[in-house]
Image (cartoon, rainbow, N blue to C red):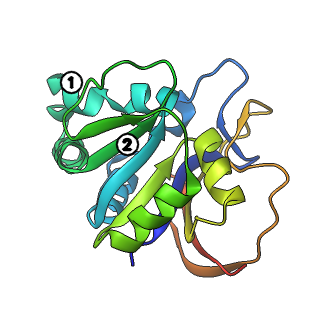
């Protein structure tokens, strides 16, 4: 059975974007990006809400992004090769390959997908992740904490969800980013 991973880059005070919707302070350097690439290699499917999907599609639709560095080109390849499921009531058609649209997040469907998959899945975006957390579907959290206080904005973790976690891995980076990996215990 595959695992469902929640991976996010967030400020020290827990936000994925600030009050203005900006996240330029969260751009990883090559060292962090290379580490993220290695984490994403075993992922076969990305689950996204519409907004996160629209943020990520540039990895396939903007060739200049992949040409910026070897690390970014590597991520573009990884992302393009994975399946994507986008949960949206407004998106008519996907803009990328290997992508399908679902109109509603169905926890039982995701549970069946996890049971049948031979590669891990990730859930991207805090709103969709909150639904997955509430349904008891998330197996691990992979968080990259940025040395930045956003002071407010969009929280990276859901409110009202209580889970016991076990620290499985941690790593500091030269840039001040810190990676922590937690397994969900209950």
The residue that mark 2 highlights is: 85
Tell me the quadrant of the picture where the N terminus can be found. Answer: bottom left
- Compared to residue 59, the image places residue 132 above or below, namely below
As helix, strand or loop, the secondary structure at mark 2 comes to: strand
Kindly identify the residue that appears in the image at 38 percent across and 45 percent down: 29
- Near mark 1 (Cα within 10 A), the count class, few <14, some 14-19 or many ≥20, is some
Front-most of residues 162 and 9: 162
The percent coordinates of residue 107 (x first, y second) are 57, 56
Kindly identify the residue that appears in the image at 21 percent across and 22 percent down: 62
Q: Is residue 70 left or right of residue 127?
A: left
Q: Is residue 8 left or right of residue 149?
A: left
The residue that mark 1 highlights is: 61
The percent coordinates of residue 28 (x first, y second) are 43, 44
Of the two numbered discs 2 and 1 on the same chain, state the one appearing first in sequence: 1
Q: Please tell me whether mark 2 or mark 1 is closer to you in this view.
A: 2
Tell me the quadrant of the picture where the C terminus can be found. Answer: bottom right
Front-most of residues 77 and 73: 77
Front-most of residues 157 and 151: 157
Locate residue 117: give its quadrant. bottom left
Kindly identify the residue that appears in the image at 38 percent across and 49 percent down: 46
- Compared to residue 11, the image places residue 141 above or below, namely below
As helix, strand or loop, the secondary structure at mark 1 comes to: helix
- Compared to residue 155, the image places residue 51 above or below, namely above
Kindly identify the residue that appears in the image at 54 percent across and 60 percent down: 108
What's the distance in space between the residues labelled 2 and 1, CA to CA?
A: 17 Å
């Amino acid at each position: 059975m595959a695992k469902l991973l929640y991976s996010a880059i967030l400020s020290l005070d827990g936000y994925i974007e600030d009050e203005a919707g900006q996240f330029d302070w969260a751009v990883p350097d090559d060292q962090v990006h290379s580490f993220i690439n290695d984490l994403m290699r075993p992922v076969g499917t990305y689950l996204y809400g519409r907004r996160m999907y629209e943020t990520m599609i540039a990895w396939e639709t903007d060739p200049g992004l992949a040409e910026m560095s070897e690390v970014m080109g590597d991520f573009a390849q990884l992302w393009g090769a994975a399946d994507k499921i986008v949960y949206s009531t407004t998106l008519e058609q996907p803009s990328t390959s290997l992508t399908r649209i679902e109109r509603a997040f169905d926890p039982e469907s995701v549970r069946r997908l996890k049971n049948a998959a031979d590669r891990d899945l990730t859930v991207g975006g805090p709103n969709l992740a909150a639904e997955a957390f509430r349904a008891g579907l998330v197996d691990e959290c992979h968080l990259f904490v940025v040395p930045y206080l956003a002071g407010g904005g969009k929280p990276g973790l859901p409110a009202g969800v209580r889970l016991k976690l076990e620290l499985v891995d941690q790593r500091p980076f030269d840039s001040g980013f810190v990676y922590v990996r937690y397994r969900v215990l209950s």
